[in-house]
Image (cartoon, helix red, strand yellow):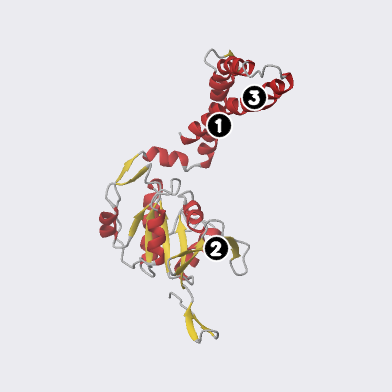
Amino acid sequence: MSRSLSVSDSSLGVAVDSPRVVKYALAGAPNVGKSTIFYRLVGRRVKIANYPGKTLDKEVGSFVEGETRVELSDLPGIFNAKDPRDEDERLALSDALKGDYDGVVVVAAPHVMKESISLLRMLAKVRKVLFVVNMVDIAGPILDEEGLSSKLGVPVIYVSAAKGMGIQKLRRALADNLCGMADVPDVDVELKGRLWQARLLSRPAIAVPILLGILMLTLVALLFFVDGTTPFGESPFALEPAMQPILDRIGSLLVVPGNPLLSLLLRNGIWSGVSVVILFIPYVAAVAFFMAI
């Protein structure tokens, strides 16, 4: 179903081929990182499309890999492929099964592997699919990609959308249309890693308070180690109060004999501004450190 167009270039008298176009749908359970993968692939080149006669939206984007333009549709979440609970799920499942796509990317995550396999089994019987397992930096199948692919009968790629791991490999696979159809067996996929963390962070009711708590701890740590003031009193280990006397001492040395105006400019003008920048550096470094954690 891939498409390649040929247009005539009258100035050269030759036919010029436009990029080959392949179209995919991204399908998967809610909170598996499907939309994060979508934005990792297409960036900001996104538009909103409506299902005909419905108010439900889906995001559509594209990217170019080599000589191929890949078009992606991010479908609403499908948690129960066997018995969709609401109209959103039914429309998304119908689109995945019958939509005008060259293949469907089934996005899975460790905490909903059983539901993801169920969706994969349904789709792989009627159209080409690619099975993408997200969050493998936290937890993932014991088998490697080749082993799981052999077990399921369809191509498999492991990614971490949060860290960008495996995204380039996924781009190439989509451009090359590395999808397949199969009668996927009903198998249990053994997992390893911090499965509890994947389950925890996939629940907004739990993940949001955790994130807010981390932000508050970061703020308290900044006040304690850098500024020296905390809700519980002054910190004896603060960096800024320790640096200030050193900076003041350096400023007092910026004296030009016989030229008080130049000395004033150096000390109260230039060095004062430099001191502010120097004192601000620990804040930036601390924020970067805690964000990295």
The mark that comes first in sequence, 1 or 3, is 3
Labelled disc at residue 63: none
CA separation in Å, label 3 and label 2 = 53 Å
Q: In this view, does 274 lie above or below 58?
A: above
Q: Is mark 3 on a helix, strand or loop?
A: helix
Residue ID at (48%, 57%): 41
Query: Which residue in the structure is indicated by mark 1?
Result: 284
Residue extending farthest to the front is 258
Query: Which residue in the structure is indicated by mark 2?
Result: 60
Mark 3 residue type: Trp
| Residue 121 visible (yes or no) | yes
Disc tally is 3
Camera-side residue of 10 and 217 = 10
Q: Is residue 123 above or below residue 271?
A: below
CA separation in Å, label 1 and label 2 = 37 Å
Is 115 left, or right, of 36 in this rendering?
left
Mark 1 residue type: Val
**In front of the other: label 1 or label 3?**
3
Q: Position of residue 112 (x, y in %)?
A: 40, 49
Camera-side residue of 16 and 246 = 246
Query: Which residue in the structure is indicated by mark 3?
Result: 271
Q: What element carries label 1?
A: helix
The mark that comes first in sequence, 1 or 2, is 2
Question: Which quarter shows the N terminus?
Answer: bottom left
